[in-house]
Structures are given as structure tokens and as C-alpha cells.
Image (cartoon, rainbow, N blue to C red):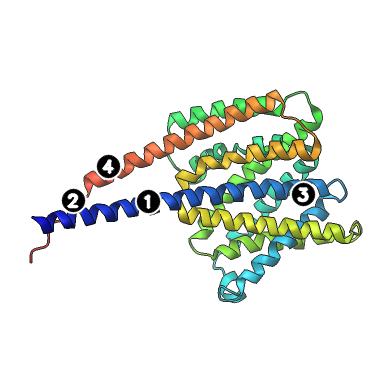
Amino acid sequence: MAKLLARMNKSAEKNHEHHRMHHNHAVLGITLMIIGLALYPLSDAFIKHLMGTYSVPQATFLRAITRVIPLLIAVFFHGGLRKVLYTEHPRRHFFRLGVNLAYTYAFMYAFSMGSLTSIYTLSYTSPFFMIILSAIMLKETISWEKWAAVAIGMIGVIIAMRPGSSVFEMASILVLIGTFLGALNKILMRRLASTDHSLAIAIYPNLMMIIVTFPLLINSWKPMPWEHWGIFAIVGTITAAGQYCIAQALRFAQGSTLAPIDYSTFFWVVVLDYMWWNKSLEAYTLIGAAIIVGSNLYILHRTRREEARKKKAASAITPPELPEVS
């Protein structure tokens, strides 16, 4: 009896230790995600700042170069160019590269026109477009509750777009186009992720951006002082650090735990707009953002419930394991 109690106590201690380690990993994952998501708006702020001096094609070209250099360095730690960049689906890549090119330019031109806060607010519509595209392209069944959340979220979009402001209407349209193409890009990435190397999926769009944009700069390149080269190098470093933090966060915590943290970027863009360009948060943007984020969180809640229901149904169907006969 004493041995049994000792064994039970030891088992309880192990379970407690496992729970504590799991909790610590989740906290680390959340911390890394917050840091990674804070670095992306900072990178975009630097790019927007430089767009006051340089054209959108030149800024896009330099942004692609600063991103591709660390990725190419990483290739040599993953087996070399041939192993990483080989693909059996060149057509899928070309289609995705065209989508990615249009999506990037839409956002880059939007950054040159609108505030970070307004652009990020409208970019939160990505889950709405993911639902629409999943229903059309992947033939997924979408519940009426999710469709209702999408409809309510679109009301938030209309509020955030501030109809009547001709300058920002153009930026708003570009952001919505870019966000739709970004959602399509994610679906195309899902298909490639099962067969192609993740580095190849990240490298090809930047190479395409460099190849397509270079001819546009032959007669319009603006010479840059060394400090601006330094800023672009900082942008590349910040972006790479943000990608690394987010990738590591997904190792330590579940995606469902981290998903709501995506909206922490709203705090950072509000701060950056105020500190860098002296732009205060306006009421219509805040109201629109609240409706969009609220709709997204409800969609996340419904998704979690549907997944839990599927797991419960699957476990009910699976027969219990029979004990081993010694």
C-alpha cells in the first residue's frame, strides 16, 4: 500500500511539473509573438518614412533585397540552393508569384498614402476573405454564424474607410485589394507548403519582386546617402527578427492561443503614427477597428468550438484500445 501511494505521489509530481513546463512554454510563446508582431509595424514605419524621399518601386526593390539576403544565407544551412529551391510545381509558383507581386505593390502604394493605423485596421479583414476563398476554392462548409460575423465585420470596414475622403478612399481600396490578394496568397502557400521547402516559398516572391521592379528603376533610380542604406539594412534585420520570433512562438504555443495576439499590432501602429507623424487616433477608425476585431474574435471562437466538436465526434467513433494480454 505504501509503495502504491508513493507511486501515485510521484506520478502527481510529474504531472504537476509537466503542467508547469507547458505553462512556461505558452508564456514564452506569447512573449515571442508580441515581440515579433511589434517588429513588423516598426519595419513598415521605416519604409513609410523613406517613401517620403523615394518612389514606391525603389522602396519595394530595396525592401525585397534586404529580405532576400538573410534568406539566401539560410539556404546554405539547409542543404544548398538545389535542394531548397527545387520544385515539381513551377506553375503553382508562378501563379502565386503574380498574386504576391500585386499584393505587395497594393500595400506599398497604400503605405505611401494612408496612416499605419488606418491601413492595419483594414488589413484585419484578412480572415473574412479567407472564409470567402475557403468556401469558393477549398469547398469548405461555412456556418451561418461565420457568414454573419463577416457581414458585421464589413460594416466595420465601411466605418473605418471614412467615405467622403477622396485621398484615403484610394488607399482604402488598395488595402482591401491587397488584403484579398494576401488571403489568396495564404491559400496558395498552404498548397505549396506540403511539397516545397519553406525557404523556397519565402525566397521566390522576393526574387520575382527584384526581377520585375529592376527595369522600372533604370531611368528613375534616386541616389541614396549611406544613412538611408543603413535604414534599409535595419528594415531587413527587423523583418528577419520578426519572422524568427513568430516562427519560434508557434513552436512554444498553439496557434489558437496566439491568434488573438495578432491584434496587438493595433497598439503599436497607433503609437508609431503619433510619435513619428503626430497623427492621433480618430473615432471612426477606432469604432471600425473594434467591429472588425470583434468579428474576427467571434470567428476564432466559432472555429475553436467546431474543432472541439469534431474531435469529440472522432473520439466517440474510435473504439477503445483493448488491454494487452500478458
Image disc number at residue 20: 1
> Does residue 13 sit above or below 308 in this rendering?
below
* Residue at mark 2 to residue at mark 1: CA–CA distance: 32 Å
The x and y percentages for residue 170 are 77, 34
Which sits earlier in the primary sequence, circle 2 or circle 4? 4
Tell which circle, 3 or 1, labels the residue nearer the N-terminal end.
Answer: 1
Q: Label 3: which residue?
A: 46
- Compared with 243, 273 (above or below) is above
Q: The residue under label 2 is which amino acid type?
A: Pro
Secondary structure at badge 4 equals helix
Instruction: Classify 10 Å Cα crowding around label 2: few (below 14), some (14-19), many (20 and above).
Output: few
- On the image, numbered disc 4 is attached to which residue? 313
**Residue 27 shows in the view:** yes
Looking at marks 3 and 4 on the same chain, the residue that comes earlier in the sequence is marked by 3
Q: Measuring 60% from the left and 56% from the top, which residue is drawn there?
A: 243
Q: Which residue is mark 2?
A: 319
Q: Quadrant of residue 242?
A: bottom right
In front: label 3 or label 1: 1
Task: Return the residue nearer the eye: 321 or 22.
Answer: 22
